[in-house]
Image (cartoon, rainbow, N blue to C red):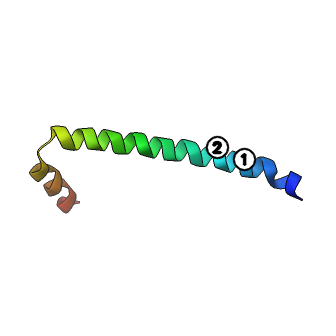
Amino acid sequence: MRGKYAPIQLDFCQHHLTFSHKLTMLLQKMDRFTEEAPATSLSRDITNE
């Protein structure tokens, strides 16, 4: 039973790792954007949406 589902579980783990890696990269980009942009304009964009 375990051997049957092992590849699926491994595939899910790899997918989850790449997803969290992409999320980390996105957060780093947002951090850089926040540093460059004034905080007031950023908060205005968030409240408009």
Q: Is residue 17 above or below residue 2?
A: above
Q: Residue at x 16, y 56 (%)?
A: 43
SS assignment at label 1: helix
Q: Residue at x 29, y 43 (%)?
A: 30
Q: Residue at x 80, y 51 (%)?
A: 6
Q: Give neighbour class at mark 1: few <14, some 14-19, many 20+ (Cα, 10 Å).
A: few
Amino acid under disc 1? Leu
Give the residue number, with chain letter if any, for mark 2: 14
Q: Which mark is residue 1?
A: none
Q: Position of residue 34 (x, y in %)?
A: 21, 44
Amino acid under disc 2? Gln
- Residue 32 vs residue 38: left or right? right
Q: Is residue 46 above or below residue 28?
A: below
Where does the N terminus fall, quadrant-wise? Answer: bottom right
Q: Position of residue 47 (x, y in %)?
A: 18, 62
Give the residue number, with chain letter if any, for mark 1: 10
Q: Position of residue 49 (x, y in %)?
A: 23, 60
SS assignment at label 2: helix
Q: Decide: marks 1, 2 in contact (CB < 8 A)?
A: yes
